[in-house]
Amino acid sequence: MEKLFTLIDKNYEEIVEIRRHLHEYPELSFEEVETPAYIAAYHKELGHEVREGVGGRGVVAVLRGAKPGKTVALRADFDALAIQEENDIPYKSKVAGKMHACGHDGHTATLLGLAKALNKMKSEITGNIIFIHQHAEEVAPGGAKPMIEDGCLDGVDVIFGTHLWAPTPIGEILVRDGAIMAAADKVEIAIQGKGGHGAEPHHSIDAVTLASQFVISAQQLISRRIDPLKSAVLTIGHFEAINPFNVIADRVKLAGTIRTFEESVRTQMEQELEAVLNATCQAFGASYEYRYTRGYPPVYNHQKETEFVAQLASTVPGVEQVKTCPPFMVGEDFAYYLEKVPGTFFFTGAKSPEWETAYPHHHARFNFDERAMLIAAKTLGKATLEYLKEY
């Protein structure tokens, strides 16, 4: 294990270089071209078996050890977000309106740096290691599901993954058995009223007023319809009524997200949200369109594999504390991998102690302490070698 850690440390400057290169040239979900080509070329240079275009734009590389054994899969995503970067850094995004605002550039650099270190130890490895580089994590239906359908998990015995987590101080590893991340669904609504003069509301059906009433009423589903011992989040993030200031809008478009952990609550939210919408519109003679799209399922970690990582992480250099975290309402299509094979997904703290403020994920000024990539690589690497040795 010391040899692995030493090799990862030697790769650190290259890992940072890779991360910054990817950060400068972000590509959005389902639009990735140069990023997967870069990843594939890197693995080919190492001599790994490489398959490109997996499930669309994914890349799968295989390192075969000197002796037959179990197969461990490690996954990193590589898509960016449609956000204009506001950071003043030397490696700022060079693509207008796009940036790595969630750390996927760091995930990819971490896995590539780890792959290089493990490659130098292949004569000592029993079993196989599959590096899953996934496209399109940010936008449902995501890249995980089509990659699985295209065989990325064939022969895999266990899968591990991590997310660099900016709100958590560097040196902390967050684990949780069972539900750690929520189902992430999308709702799209259009309310059709009757336009009119802003001075004569009695001759119209004001879609803005109706939509506003609906947004407020819908929040009561959380406080008055959902079991208080269960969890749900409803956020309407898009409210559009483009109109002159003195004209009553006839149509409003809304869009939002619903987050849940339990299937019964998920179904209840889908049905009762429309019931509130229907009642609001009927009361004033308006009509509506309603579309509820189920996104990623909840991420459920397997107990044995979670305990396995929690125990070994405490002895990884740079790890000061391993904590059991509460469930997060954010979503991740890593859920699909865990539906197929045992495994666990954990968070690697990435907040620098030198920062007063850590901007949240998906923020235009998001960043992370690059030293967290060392901790992530060493934790994933140790989990891989320990698993292949023990099982």
Image: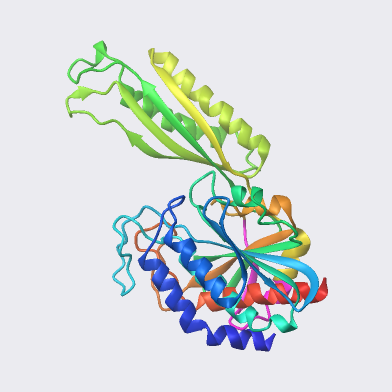
Instruction: Give, as a single range, the part of the protein colored magenta.
Output: 310-326
Magenta segment includes 323: yes
Q: 69 or 355, which lies in front?
A: 69
Position of 90 compared to 164: left or right?
A: left
Residue at 75% from the left image edge and 76% from the top image edge: 386
Q: 121 or 98, which lies in front?
A: 121
Q: 129 or 360, which lies in front?
A: 129
Residue at 45% from the left image edge and 74% from the top image edge: 18
Position of 1 compared to 89: left or right?
A: right
Q: Is residue 244 above or below residue 325?
A: above
Residue at 46% from the left image edge and 83% from the top image edge: 13
> Residue 221 at x, y = what percent?
54, 32
In the picture, residue 49 is in which quadrant? Answer: bottom right
Can you say which quadrant of the picture contains the N terminus? bottom right
Q: Is residue 109 above or below residue 13?
A: above
Answer whether residue 167 is visible to the viewer in this image.
no
Can you say which quadrant of the picture contains the C terminus? bottom right
> Residue 153 at x, y = what percent?
69, 56
Q: How is the image coloured?
A: rainbow
Answer whether residue 249 is visible to the viewer in this image.
yes
> Residue 58 at x, y = what percent?
55, 57
Hey, which residue is sitting farthest right in the picture?
Answer: 391
In the picture, residue 314 is in which quadrant? Answer: bottom right
